[in-house]
Amino acid sequence: MPGADFEALHAAGIQLKRWRPGAAERARCPQCDRRGHDDALSVRIDDDGRGATWLCHRCGWAGGVRDGTASAPAPVRQHRPPAADVQHQSLSDWGRRLWTDARLITADGPAGRYLSARGCRLPHPDGDLRWHPALRHFSGHVGPALVALVTDVVTAEPVSLHRTWITDDGSGRKAAIDKPRVLLKGHRKAGGCIRLWPDDEVSLGLGLAEGIETALTLARAFTPVWAAIDAGNLGAFPVLDGIESITVAVDHDPAGQKSFDALASRWATAGREVRRVMAPAAGDDLNDWAAGIDHAHR
């Protein structure tokens, strides 16, 4: 156990019982400790055992230590959405601030570890998927979340945000809260999509799925990919100029197959090639199927 790093954590008020390289430990947060068995602070120890980073999922306090030297970055800005009774035709100022504060996804961060554990390919760095380390859910939970920019399929105008609260332990699980996936209230969803690869990466072919994780599973074999958000948007996905073929990861349920049939009919009538990829088991999407195979081979 590197004594200098361990002592630096104690100097910051973080009381860890053990030091294991590559481990994710929980502890009381010295900034907002509620006593008892409080463990809102997550401490990630580097794989080489020479440092650690920490984040409080309640108050957003974050920092790090490396080779015995501690640092504390600026506090994470908290975001509270505006009143839901206001209807926005484009992304609100609040949504734009949140998108600006969201961070790029890297393989060694919580969002990257979540996606990798789910069997996903990481999105294009210029795509419309990022993450926030300490985002507040309407339930009061504060924790890491994927933040996706929803744009109009045709015009690419930002219209909403899609957020998915996740765990930061590399397990690939969503946060244990009611409705961990949430769109912004008072914002338009119809006609929108999540461009996981930017427009300039799209040439003759495009991959499409309902959900983000399903689209990023398809991306293991085919790029570029976008996410349509849900079956309704997938079924209404318009024929786009310049795209000669579309490959769709179809959820294996009645809604998924109905939406594919509507999309396929529209694109085929326009003379475009349509291909379907679907998980073999009823009730699964492509990500469910791929995650099961990955787990069986570990």
Image (cartoon, helix red, strand yellow):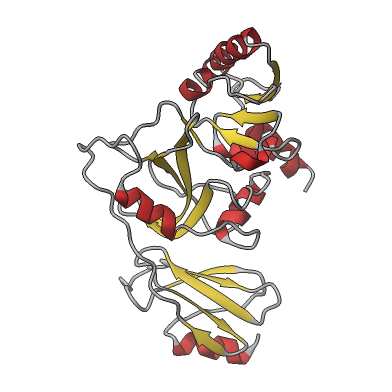
Residue 171 visible in the snapshot: no
- Residue 215 sits in which quadrant? top right
Tally of numbered tags:
0
Residue 171 image position (x, y, % from top left)? 60, 52
Q: Give percent across and percent down for residue 139.
A: 31, 49
Q: Is residue 285 above or below residue 134?
A: above
Q: Is residue 213 left or right of residue 292?
A: left
Q: Which of these two is toward me, 232 or 283?
A: 232
**Residue 49 location, x and y as percent?**
67, 79
Quadrant location of residue 188? Answer: top left
Q: Is residue 112 visible?
A: yes
Residue at 61% x, 91% y is 3
Residue 212 horizontal/vertical position (percent): 56, 38
Asked where in the image residue 284 lies, by quadrant, the reply is top right
At horizontal 66% and vertical 30% (from top left) the residue drawn is 206
Residue visible at 63% across and 47% down?
A: 123
Q: Find the residue positioned furthest to the front.
A: 242
